[in-house]
Image (cartoon, rainbow, N blue to C red):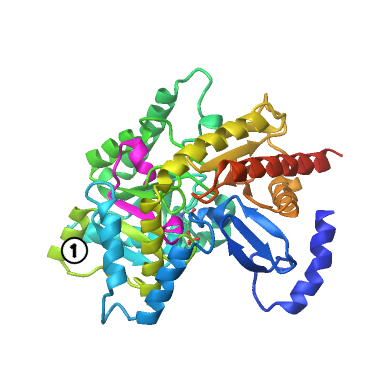
Amino acid sequence: MLGRHIESAASTIVSMTRILHRQIGHSYPVATAARGIMIRDSAGKEYIDASGGAAVSCLGHSHPDVLAAMHSQLDQLAYAHTSFFTSQAAEELADELAAHAPQGLNRIFYVSGGSEAVEGALKLARQYFVERGEQQRRFFIARRQSYHGVTLGALAIGGREWQRKQFGPLLIETQHVSPVYEYRGKRADETADAYGARLAEELESKIDELGGENVIAFIAETVVGATLGAVPAVPGYFRRVREICDRHGILLILDEVMCGMGRTGTMHACEQEGTNPDLMAIAKGLGGGYAPIGALLIQEKIFNTLAEGSGAFLHSHTYMGHPLACAAALAVQRVIGRDKLLENVRRQGNYLSRRLNERFGNHPFVGDLRGRGLFQGIEIVSDRGTKVPFDPSYKLYARIKHEAMARGLMVYPMGGTVDGTRGDHVLLAPPFIIDSIGIDAIVERLGEAIDAAVAAQRQ
Ligand SMILES: Cc1ncc(COP(=O)(O)O)c(C=O)c1O
Protein backbone atom coordinates (compact mmCIF):
# COMPACT_ATOMS: atom_id res chain seq x y z
CA MET A 1 0.00 0.00 0.00
CA LEU A 2 2.74 2.41 1.09
CA GLY A 3 4.82 1.48 -1.95
CA ARG A 4 1.91 2.05 -4.32
CA HIS A 5 1.20 5.42 -2.78
CA ILE A 6 4.81 6.50 -3.24
CA GLU A 7 4.96 5.14 -6.77
CA SER A 8 1.79 6.84 -8.02
CA ALA A 9 2.72 10.16 -6.46
CA ALA A 10 6.29 9.89 -7.71
CA SER A 11 5.46 10.39 -11.36
CA THR A 12 3.80 13.73 -10.67
CA ILE A 13 6.53 14.98 -8.35
CA VAL A 14 9.43 13.79 -10.49
CA SER A 15 8.08 15.67 -13.49
CA MET A 16 7.30 18.73 -11.34
CA THR A 17 10.39 19.13 -9.20
CA ARG A 18 13.99 19.95 -10.05
CA ILE A 19 15.03 19.45 -6.44
CA LEU A 20 17.18 16.52 -5.44
CA HIS A 21 14.93 15.76 -2.49
CA ARG A 22 15.94 13.54 0.43
CA GLN A 23 14.15 10.61 -1.22
CA ILE A 24 14.08 10.75 -4.99
CA GLY A 25 10.58 10.03 -6.22
CA HIS A 26 8.91 10.47 -2.84
CA SER A 27 5.94 12.76 -2.82
CA TYR A 28 6.29 15.54 -0.24
CA PRO A 29 3.31 17.70 0.71
CA VAL A 30 3.96 21.40 0.13
CA ALA A 31 4.09 23.33 3.41
CA THR A 32 2.35 26.66 2.95
CA ALA A 33 1.69 28.07 6.41
CA ALA A 34 2.46 27.41 10.03
CA ARG A 35 1.52 28.84 13.41
CA GLY A 36 2.18 27.63 16.93
CA ILE A 37 2.44 23.83 16.94
CA MET A 38 0.66 23.40 13.58
CA ILE A 39 1.88 23.27 9.96
CA ARG A 40 -0.57 23.41 7.03
CA ASP A 41 0.01 22.02 3.53
CA SER A 42 -1.22 23.27 0.15
CA ALA A 43 -4.23 20.92 0.31
CA GLY A 44 -5.31 22.59 3.56
CA LYS A 45 -4.39 19.61 5.72
CA GLU A 46 -2.99 20.44 9.16
CA TYR A 47 -0.25 18.57 11.04
CA ILE A 48 0.74 18.78 14.69
CA ASP A 49 4.49 19.34 14.74
CA ALA A 50 5.29 16.84 17.50
CA SER A 51 8.96 16.61 16.57
CA GLY A 52 9.76 20.29 15.89
CA GLY A 53 10.81 18.99 12.45
CA ALA A 54 14.00 17.35 13.70
CA ALA A 55 14.00 18.89 17.19
CA VAL A 56 14.38 22.37 15.67
CA SER A 57 11.19 24.41 16.16
CA CYS A 58 11.47 25.00 19.90
CA LEU A 59 9.15 28.02 19.89
CA GLY A 60 6.71 26.60 17.38
CA HIS A 61 6.01 28.46 14.18
CA SER A 62 5.50 32.15 13.34
CA HIS A 63 6.21 33.44 16.83
CA PRO A 64 5.32 37.14 16.58
CA ASP A 65 8.26 38.36 18.69
CA VAL A 66 10.79 36.48 16.58
CA LEU A 67 9.23 37.67 13.33
CA ALA A 68 9.26 41.27 14.60
CA ALA A 69 12.95 41.02 15.56
CA MET A 70 13.79 39.59 12.13
CA HIS A 71 11.84 42.29 10.31
CA SER A 72 13.56 44.96 12.33
CA GLN A 73 17.00 43.45 11.62
CA LEU A 74 16.23 43.26 7.90
CA ASP A 75 15.29 46.93 7.88
CA GLN A 76 18.70 47.76 9.36
CA LEU A 77 21.18 45.27 7.96
CA ALA A 78 20.76 41.87 6.35
CA TYR A 79 24.38 40.93 5.83
CA ALA A 80 27.92 42.18 6.36
CA HIS A 81 30.90 39.89 5.78
CA THR A 82 32.67 39.00 9.02
CA SER A 83 36.15 39.69 7.61
CA PHE A 84 35.11 43.35 7.47
CA PHE A 85 32.55 43.85 10.23
CA THR A 86 30.94 42.48 13.33
CA SER A 87 27.27 43.27 14.02
CA GLN A 88 25.25 44.24 17.05
CA ALA A 89 23.02 41.18 16.68
CA ALA A 90 26.00 38.82 16.64
CA GLU A 91 27.65 40.53 19.64
CA GLU A 92 24.43 40.56 21.69
CA LEU A 93 23.72 36.92 20.93
CA ALA A 94 27.25 35.96 22.00
CA ASP A 95 26.73 37.83 25.29
CA GLU A 96 23.40 36.05 25.79
CA LEU A 97 24.90 32.62 25.08
CA ALA A 98 27.93 33.19 27.32
CA ALA A 99 25.67 34.40 30.14
CA HIS A 100 23.82 31.05 30.19
CA ALA A 101 26.71 28.77 29.23
CA PRO A 102 28.27 26.15 31.49
CA GLN A 103 31.22 27.55 33.43
CA GLY A 104 34.13 28.68 31.31
CA LEU A 105 32.42 28.29 27.92
CA ASN A 106 32.60 32.02 27.33
CA ARG A 107 33.66 32.28 23.71
CA ILE A 108 31.41 31.78 20.70
CA PHE A 109 32.16 30.74 17.13
CA TYR A 110 29.21 31.06 14.77
CA VAL A 111 28.27 28.70 11.96
CA SER A 112 25.10 27.90 10.00
CA GLY A 113 24.10 24.49 11.34
CA GLY A 114 24.93 21.37 13.30
CA SER A 115 27.43 19.67 10.98
CA GLU A 116 29.37 22.91 10.65
CA ALA A 117 29.44 23.28 14.44
CA VAL A 118 30.85 19.77 14.85
CA GLU A 119 33.33 20.24 12.00
CA GLY A 120 34.50 23.47 13.65
CA ALA A 121 34.89 21.68 17.00
CA LEU A 122 37.13 19.00 15.47
CA LYS A 123 39.37 21.52 13.76
CA LEU A 124 39.55 23.89 16.71
CA ALA A 125 40.48 20.98 18.99
CA ARG A 126 43.29 19.98 16.63
CA GLN A 127 44.55 23.56 16.22
CA TYR A 128 44.55 24.01 20.01
CA PHE A 129 46.99 21.13 20.41
CA VAL A 130 49.12 22.16 17.43
CA GLU A 131 49.52 25.62 18.97
CA ARG A 132 50.54 23.97 22.25
CA GLY A 133 53.24 22.03 20.42
CA GLU A 134 51.42 18.69 20.61
CA GLN A 135 51.31 18.00 16.86
CA GLN A 136 51.29 14.24 17.43
CA ARG A 137 47.70 14.32 18.66
CA ARG A 138 45.52 13.08 15.80
CA PHE A 139 42.84 10.68 17.05
CA PHE A 140 39.22 11.35 17.89
CA ILE A 141 37.27 8.85 19.93
CA ALA A 142 33.49 8.82 19.50
CA ARG A 143 30.67 6.37 20.14
CA ARG A 144 28.85 3.90 17.95
CA GLN A 145 25.16 4.64 17.29
CA SER A 146 25.72 8.39 17.37
CA TYR A 147 25.02 11.08 14.80
CA HIS A 148 27.15 14.18 14.43
CA GLY A 149 26.29 15.36 10.91
CA VAL A 150 27.17 14.71 7.29
CA THR A 151 30.25 16.73 6.41
CA LEU A 152 33.33 14.52 6.15
CA GLY A 153 34.71 15.18 9.63
CA ALA A 154 31.33 14.93 11.34
CA LEU A 155 30.53 11.80 9.33
CA ALA A 156 33.86 10.22 10.29
CA ILE A 157 33.23 10.58 13.99
CA GLY A 158 29.55 9.60 13.64
CA GLY A 159 28.64 6.07 14.52
CA ARG A 160 25.97 5.29 11.95
CA GLU A 161 27.70 2.60 9.95
CA TRP A 162 25.19 2.52 7.07
CA GLN A 163 25.79 6.22 6.44
CA ARG A 164 29.58 6.09 6.74
CA LYS A 165 30.24 2.92 4.76
CA GLN A 166 30.35 4.16 1.20
CA PHE A 167 32.40 7.23 2.13
CA GLY A 168 34.87 5.13 4.14
CA PRO A 169 38.00 5.85 2.05
CA LEU A 170 37.46 9.60 2.51
CA LEU A 171 37.03 9.63 6.28
CA ILE A 172 39.62 10.54 8.91
CA GLU A 173 40.52 7.66 11.16
CA THR A 174 38.23 7.63 14.19
CA GLN A 175 37.91 5.13 17.00
CA HIS A 176 34.49 4.20 18.33
CA VAL A 177 33.46 2.87 21.72
CA SER A 178 30.07 1.68 23.01
CA PRO A 179 27.19 4.08 23.48
CA VAL A 180 25.36 4.32 26.79
CA TYR A 181 22.21 2.41 25.86
CA GLU A 182 20.79 1.11 29.09
CA TYR A 183 17.81 -0.72 27.57
CA ARG A 184 20.04 -3.06 25.57
CA GLY A 185 23.55 -2.57 26.92
CA LYS A 186 23.17 -2.97 30.68
CA ARG A 187 23.49 -6.55 31.87
CA ALA A 188 20.68 -7.94 34.00
CA ASP A 189 23.05 -8.49 36.92
CA GLU A 190 24.57 -5.00 36.69
CA THR A 191 23.55 -1.74 38.39
CA ALA A 192 23.27 1.42 36.29
CA ASP A 193 26.33 2.73 38.11
CA ALA A 194 28.38 -0.38 37.33
CA TYR A 195 27.26 -0.19 33.70
CA GLY A 196 28.44 3.44 33.49
CA ALA A 197 31.75 2.48 35.11
CA ARG A 198 32.22 -0.39 32.63
CA LEU A 199 31.69 1.96 29.67
CA ALA A 200 34.06 4.53 31.14
CA GLU A 201 36.68 1.78 31.50
CA GLU A 202 36.14 0.86 27.85
CA LEU A 203 36.93 4.46 26.92
CA GLU A 204 40.05 4.47 29.04
CA SER A 205 41.25 1.19 27.50
CA LYS A 206 40.78 2.70 24.04
CA ILE A 207 42.82 5.74 25.07
CA ASP A 208 45.57 3.50 26.46
CA GLU A 209 45.58 1.49 23.23
CA LEU A 210 46.06 4.63 21.13
CA GLY A 211 48.40 6.31 23.62
CA GLY A 212 46.80 9.15 25.55
CA GLU A 213 49.32 11.61 24.12
CA ASN A 214 48.00 10.87 20.59
CA VAL A 215 44.32 11.54 21.27
CA ILE A 216 42.73 14.94 20.59
CA ALA A 217 39.24 14.53 22.02
CA PHE A 218 36.37 12.32 23.03
CA ILE A 219 33.09 13.45 21.47
CA ALA A 220 29.58 12.41 22.42
CA GLU A 221 25.96 13.53 22.27
CA THR A 222 24.95 14.26 25.85
CA VAL A 223 21.55 12.70 25.13
CA VAL A 224 21.64 10.60 21.96
CA GLY A 225 19.06 11.90 19.50
CA ALA A 226 18.31 10.72 16.00
CA THR A 227 20.21 7.42 16.08
CA LEU A 228 18.95 5.92 19.36
CA GLY A 229 15.87 8.04 20.09
CA ALA A 230 16.43 10.29 23.13
CA VAL A 231 18.73 8.07 25.17
CA PRO A 232 20.38 9.78 28.17
CA ALA A 233 23.51 8.46 29.86
CA VAL A 234 23.32 6.63 33.19
CA PRO A 235 24.08 8.83 36.21
CA GLY A 236 27.79 9.39 36.79
CA TYR A 237 28.94 8.31 33.31
CA PHE A 238 29.86 11.77 32.06
CA ARG A 239 31.58 12.69 35.33
CA ARG A 240 33.77 9.60 34.89
CA VAL A 241 34.41 10.53 31.25
CA ARG A 242 35.43 14.03 32.29
CA GLU A 243 37.92 12.64 34.82
CA ILE A 244 39.40 10.28 32.24
CA CYS A 245 39.79 13.06 29.67
CA ASP A 246 41.46 15.30 32.24
CA ARG A 247 43.80 12.54 33.35
CA HIS A 248 45.07 12.14 29.77
CA GLY A 249 44.92 15.83 28.79
CA ILE A 250 42.23 15.07 26.21
CA LEU A 251 39.43 17.47 25.30
CA LEU A 252 35.78 16.60 25.91
CA ILE A 253 33.49 17.76 23.11
CA LEU A 254 29.74 17.52 23.69
CA ASP A 255 27.41 17.58 20.72
CA GLU A 256 24.22 19.25 21.93
CA VAL A 257 23.05 20.16 18.44
CA MET A 258 19.82 18.24 19.03
CA CYS A 259 19.51 17.79 22.78
CA GLY A 260 20.68 21.25 23.84
CA MET A 261 19.22 24.76 24.17
CA GLY A 262 16.45 23.80 26.56
CA ARG A 263 15.14 20.66 24.91
CA THR A 264 15.76 18.42 27.95
CA GLY A 265 14.47 20.97 30.49
CA THR A 266 17.74 22.75 31.25
CA MET A 267 19.44 25.16 28.87
CA HIS A 268 22.23 22.64 28.26
CA ALA A 269 21.74 18.90 28.66
CA CYS A 270 25.14 18.57 30.38
CA GLU A 271 23.85 20.62 33.33
CA GLN A 272 22.01 17.45 34.38
CA GLU A 273 25.25 15.47 34.21
CA GLY A 274 27.29 17.75 36.46
CA THR A 275 29.90 17.96 33.68
CA ASN A 276 31.32 20.79 31.61
CA PRO A 277 32.84 20.11 28.21
CA ASP A 278 35.76 21.95 26.63
CA LEU A 279 33.82 22.54 23.44
CA MET A 280 30.11 22.29 22.86
CA ALA A 281 28.25 22.26 19.53
CA ILE A 282 24.75 23.76 19.45
CA ALA A 283 22.39 24.44 16.56
CA LYS A 284 18.78 23.39 16.01
CA GLY A 285 17.02 25.01 18.99
CA LEU A 286 19.39 27.97 18.90
CA GLY A 287 17.54 29.59 16.02
CA GLY A 288 14.41 27.48 16.39
CA GLY A 289 14.12 27.10 12.61
CA TYR A 290 13.67 30.84 12.01
CA ALA A 291 17.12 31.00 10.41
CA PRO A 292 19.97 28.56 9.81
CA ILE A 293 22.41 29.05 12.65
CA GLY A 294 24.71 26.97 14.85
CA ALA A 295 27.53 27.78 17.23
CA LEU A 296 30.48 26.40 19.05
CA LEU A 297 30.85 27.30 22.72
CA ILE A 298 34.53 27.42 23.60
CA GLN A 299 36.39 27.14 26.90
CA GLU A 300 38.47 30.15 27.78
CA LYS A 301 41.72 28.09 27.86
CA ILE A 302 41.27 27.10 24.19
CA PHE A 303 40.48 30.65 23.13
CA ASN A 304 43.47 31.97 25.09
CA THR A 305 45.84 29.48 23.47
CA LEU A 306 44.90 30.82 20.04
CA ALA A 307 44.80 34.43 21.23
CA GLU A 308 48.34 34.14 22.63
CA GLY A 309 49.51 32.01 19.70
CA SER A 310 48.63 32.39 16.04
CA GLY A 311 45.83 34.86 16.73
CA ALA A 312 43.29 33.21 14.43
CA PHE A 313 41.24 30.05 14.06
CA LEU A 314 42.12 28.73 10.59
CA HIS A 315 38.52 28.05 9.72
CA SER A 316 35.70 30.33 8.56
CA HIS A 317 32.50 30.43 6.51
CA THR A 318 30.94 33.14 4.36
CA TYR A 319 27.73 33.12 6.37
CA MET A 320 29.13 32.83 9.90
CA GLY A 321 27.55 35.33 12.28
CA HIS A 322 24.90 36.26 9.72
CA PRO A 323 23.12 39.25 11.28
CA LEU A 324 19.61 38.09 10.36
CA ALA A 325 20.25 34.60 11.76
CA CYS A 326 21.78 36.08 14.92
CA ALA A 327 18.81 38.43 15.40
CA ALA A 328 16.41 35.49 15.01
CA ALA A 329 18.34 33.34 17.49
CA LEU A 330 18.62 36.22 19.96
CA ALA A 331 14.86 36.74 19.83
CA VAL A 332 14.24 32.99 20.26
CA GLN A 333 16.49 32.84 23.31
CA ARG A 334 15.01 35.98 24.86
CA VAL A 335 11.45 34.65 24.47
CA ILE A 336 12.48 31.37 26.12
CA GLY A 337 13.89 33.33 29.07
CA ARG A 338 11.11 35.91 29.32
CA ASP A 339 8.28 33.37 29.13
CA LYS A 340 10.06 30.90 31.44
CA LEU A 341 9.63 28.21 28.83
CA LEU A 342 12.15 25.83 30.38
CA GLU A 343 9.68 25.43 33.26
CA ASN A 344 7.07 24.47 30.68
CA VAL A 345 9.49 22.00 29.07
CA ARG A 346 9.89 20.27 32.44
CA ARG A 347 6.18 20.40 33.31
CA GLN A 348 4.91 19.25 29.92
CA GLY A 349 7.81 16.80 29.64
CA ASN A 350 6.59 15.10 32.81
CA TYR A 351 3.07 15.09 31.45
CA LEU A 352 4.20 13.68 28.09
CA SER A 353 6.11 10.94 29.87
CA ARG A 354 3.05 10.07 31.99
CA ARG A 355 0.73 9.97 28.96
CA LEU A 356 3.21 7.84 26.96
CA ASN A 357 3.43 5.43 29.87
CA GLU A 358 -0.36 5.19 30.10
CA ARG A 359 -0.71 4.57 26.36
CA PHE A 360 2.37 2.45 25.68
CA GLY A 361 3.54 1.16 29.07
CA ASN A 362 1.90 -2.24 28.44
CA HIS A 363 1.83 -2.08 24.66
CA PRO A 364 2.88 -5.44 23.22
CA PHE A 365 5.23 -3.81 20.69
CA VAL A 366 6.76 -1.03 22.76
CA GLY A 367 9.95 -2.13 24.50
CA ASP A 368 11.18 1.11 26.04
CA LEU A 369 10.12 4.67 26.79
CA ARG A 370 12.91 7.14 27.56
CA GLY A 371 14.11 10.70 27.38
CA ARG A 372 14.13 13.97 29.26
CA GLY A 373 11.97 17.07 29.09
CA LEU A 374 10.36 17.46 25.68
CA PHE A 375 12.83 15.01 24.13
CA GLN A 376 11.41 11.51 24.38
CA GLY A 377 11.80 8.26 22.52
CA ILE A 378 9.78 5.09 22.04
CA GLU A 379 11.54 1.91 20.96
CA ILE A 380 9.38 -0.55 19.04
CA VAL A 381 10.05 -4.28 19.27
CA SER A 382 8.33 -7.37 17.91
CA ASP A 383 8.61 -9.07 21.32
CA ARG A 384 8.80 -7.20 24.63
CA GLY A 385 10.26 -10.19 26.47
CA THR A 386 13.16 -10.91 24.15
CA LYS A 387 13.48 -7.31 22.83
CA VAL A 388 13.76 -8.74 19.30
CA PRO A 389 13.15 -5.95 16.78
CA PHE A 390 10.96 -6.14 13.69
CA ASP A 391 12.47 -7.41 10.43
CA PRO A 392 14.34 -4.36 9.06
CA SER A 393 13.16 -5.09 5.51
CA TYR A 394 9.68 -4.07 6.64
CA LYS A 395 10.90 -0.51 7.44
CA LEU A 396 8.46 -0.17 10.31
CA TYR A 397 9.81 3.29 11.17
CA ALA A 398 8.90 4.59 7.69
CA ARG A 399 5.42 3.11 7.96
CA ILE A 400 4.88 4.75 11.34
CA LYS A 401 5.88 8.10 9.83
CA HIS A 402 3.49 7.53 6.93
CA GLU A 403 0.60 6.54 9.23
CA ALA A 404 1.30 9.51 11.50
CA MET A 405 1.36 11.99 8.59
CA ALA A 406 -1.92 10.49 7.34
CA ARG A 407 -3.37 11.37 10.78
CA GLY A 408 -1.97 14.92 10.75
CA LEU A 409 0.99 14.23 13.03
CA MET A 410 4.70 14.89 12.51
CA VAL A 411 7.02 12.60 14.50
CA TYR A 412 10.64 11.63 13.82
CA PRO A 413 10.98 7.84 13.51
CA MET A 414 14.23 6.12 12.56
CA GLY A 415 15.46 2.60 11.85
CA GLY A 416 18.72 0.86 12.78
CA THR A 417 18.28 1.63 16.49
CA VAL A 418 19.90 -1.58 17.73
CA ASP A 419 23.01 -1.82 15.55
CA GLY A 420 22.61 0.43 12.53
CA THR A 421 20.48 -2.12 10.69
CA ARG A 422 17.88 -3.57 13.06
CA GLY A 423 15.47 -1.77 15.33
CA ASP A 424 12.93 1.05 15.13
CA HIS A 425 12.18 4.03 17.32
CA VAL A 426 10.10 7.19 17.28
CA LEU A 427 11.50 10.48 18.52
CA LEU A 428 9.22 13.18 19.93
CA ALA A 429 10.40 16.77 20.35
CA PRO A 430 7.39 19.09 20.45
CA PRO A 431 7.75 22.89 20.74
CA PHE A 432 8.36 24.32 24.23
CA ILE A 433 5.03 26.21 24.02
CA ILE A 434 2.97 23.02 23.95
CA ASP A 435 0.17 22.46 26.48
CA SER A 436 -1.50 19.34 27.82
CA ILE A 437 -4.24 19.43 25.17
CA GLY A 438 -1.58 19.32 22.46
CA ILE A 439 0.18 16.45 24.20
CA ASP A 440 -3.06 14.46 24.54
CA ALA A 441 -3.63 14.86 20.79
CA ILE A 442 -0.06 13.76 20.00
CA VAL A 443 -0.29 10.62 22.14
CA GLU A 444 -3.69 9.69 20.72
CA ARG A 445 -2.63 10.08 17.07
CA LEU A 446 0.71 8.39 17.64
CA GLY A 447 -0.97 5.41 19.31
CA GLU A 448 -3.22 4.98 16.29
CA ALA A 449 -0.29 5.35 13.88
CA ILE A 450 1.86 2.75 15.64
CA ASP A 451 -1.05 0.31 15.93
CA ALA A 452 -1.87 0.73 12.23
CA ALA A 453 1.76 0.30 11.11
CA VAL A 454 2.28 -2.82 13.21
CA ALA A 455 -1.11 -4.30 12.23
CA ALA A 456 -0.30 -3.93 8.53
CA GLN A 457 2.93 -5.86 9.04
CA ARG A 458 1.25 -8.69 10.88
CA GLN A 459 -1.48 -9.27 8.27
C1 LIG B 1 23.51 15.49 17.45
C2 LIG B 1 23.58 16.08 16.08
N1 LIG B 1 24.74 16.60 15.65
C3 LIG B 1 24.86 17.14 14.41
C4 LIG B 1 23.77 17.19 13.56
C5 LIG B 1 23.93 17.80 12.19
O1 LIG B 1 23.22 18.99 12.12
P1 LIG B 1 22.81 19.61 10.70
O2 LIG B 1 21.81 18.69 10.11
O3 LIG B 1 22.25 20.97 11.07
O4 LIG B 1 24.05 19.73 9.90
C6 LIG B 1 22.54 16.68 13.98
C7 LIG B 1 21.38 16.69 13.08
O5 LIG B 1 20.40 16.03 13.28
C8 LIG B 1 22.44 16.10 15.27
O6 LIG B 1 21.30 15.57 15.70
Q: Is residue 197 above or below residue 120?
A: above
65 vs 361, left or right, is: left
Q: Quadrant of residue 436?
A: top right
Side (left or right) of 391 relative to 107: right
- Along the horizontal axis of the image, is 458 left or right of 148? right
On the image, the x and y values in percent for residue 310 come to 17, 69
Relative to residue 416, is residue 210 drawn left or right?
left
Give the quarter of the image for residue 424: top right
* Three-letter code, disc 1: Leu
Q: Which residue lies under the disc numbered 1?
A: 306
Q: Give 61 or 296, whichever is nearer the viewer.
A: 61
Residue 422 appears anywhere in the view = no
> Would you place residue 185 above or below residue 412 in this image?
above
The range drawn in magenta is 268-287
Mark 1: secondary structure: helix
Farthest residue in the left direction? Answer: 308
Can you give x and y, in whole percent of width and height, for residue 125 in the image? 29, 57
Residue 302 location in percent, x, y?
A: 21, 56
- Verify whether residue 279 appears in magenta: yes
Q: Quadrant of the C terminus?
A: top right
User: Dot 1, how many residues are within 10 Å of its Cα: few (below 14), some (14-19), or many (20+)?
Assistant: some
Viewer-closest of 441 and 93 = 441
Q: Is residue 420 above or below residue 40?
A: above
Position of the N terminus, as image quadrant, is bottom right
